[in-house]
Amino acid sequence: MENSTKKLYNIMGNLLKEKIVLAFSGGVDSALLLKIATFLRQNENDVVAMFFEAPSSTEEDLANAKNLAKEMQVKLYIKDVDIFVDDHIINNEKDRCYHCKSHLFNQAIELKDELGYGYVIDGTNTDDHKVYRPGLMALKNLGVVSPLNMAGFSKEMVRKLAAELGISVAKRPSAPCLLTRFPYGTKISPAKLDRIEKAEAFIRNLGFIKFRVRDHANIARIELEPADFVKFIDKKDRVIKELRKLGFSYVTLDLEGFRSGSMDEGLTEEEKKKWIL
């Protein structure tokens, strides 16, 4: 951990010499990079942050990004991005993440060039390379730099250092984009994304932290930590009522529990290997 931290600081220091645009989600990974950048910057404008305001992001994500940028006194660019200009994204194809990341990060590349900065960086860590992430290929092709991955930081290490540095979102659960809530091949619309955001916000307000609502047309499949099952059953009537108001005909609890990337479980090993870096 100590050696990786030193390496991370060295990497960030070198990148800041040519100034950086940080793709900023408001999550713990990018928040850690922003915090370190504020320690190391020589001038206030050596680093700026950019939030992609797309239908696949949430109001909570945006609020976190705004609060963190304000706390760390970093200029935040909020870019309104229409992701529904690409059929790969609209049809939620298996390589959707590649096309979505390409579309989003091209906006950051444009900002970098406009400002005359040297790099676009993001919060990819080593754990991201262990799962199905076609978007990582897009970042590589665009020349985006991932300091956490370069320094050998896993998610656990990110959280540990973020806590040591007093970052407010150090314990915030991972919040991948809303597109991950749908089976591949499902046609996506802004209304469907809005429905999922509202469903998850409702369950979060009931006190649940680590969970997902997966959208299977008229079926809501809810993934929770098994330890939360009993608590959830006690509140099931409220959940059923709310999710039916949102348009789901059936509300189910997945007995396998919460697992990140569960929509990837139907992919073949060959499909996964295609995108391994």
Image (tube, rainbow, N blue to C red):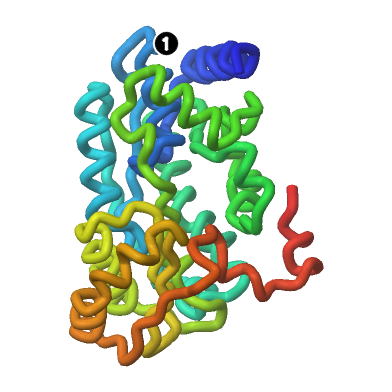
List the residue tagged with mark 1: 40
Q: In which quarter of the image is the N terminus?
A: top right
Which residue is the extreme one toward the right?
270
Position of residue 251 in the picture relative to residue 15 (left or right): left
Position of residue 31 in the picture relative to residue 263 (left or right): left
Q: Residue at x 68, y 48 (%)?
A: 130
Q: Which residue is drawn at 28% across and 40% down?
A: 65
Q: 241 and 6: which one is in front?
A: 241
Please tell me whether residue 19 is drawn above or below residue 270 in the rendered image: above
Q: Residue at x 46, y 61 (%)?
A: 226
Please tell me whether residue 195 is drawn above or below residue 107 in the rendered image: below
Q: Which residue is drawn at 25% across and 55% down?
A: 207
Helix, strand or loop at disc 1?
helix
Q: How crowded is mark 1: few (under 14 residues within 10 Å), some or many (20 or more)?
A: some
Q: Is residue 149 in view?
A: yes
Q: In which quarter of the image is residue 41?
A: top left
- Please name the amino acid that badge 1 sits on: Leu
Residue 154: x, y in percent? 60, 34
Q: 230 and 28: which one is in front?
A: 230
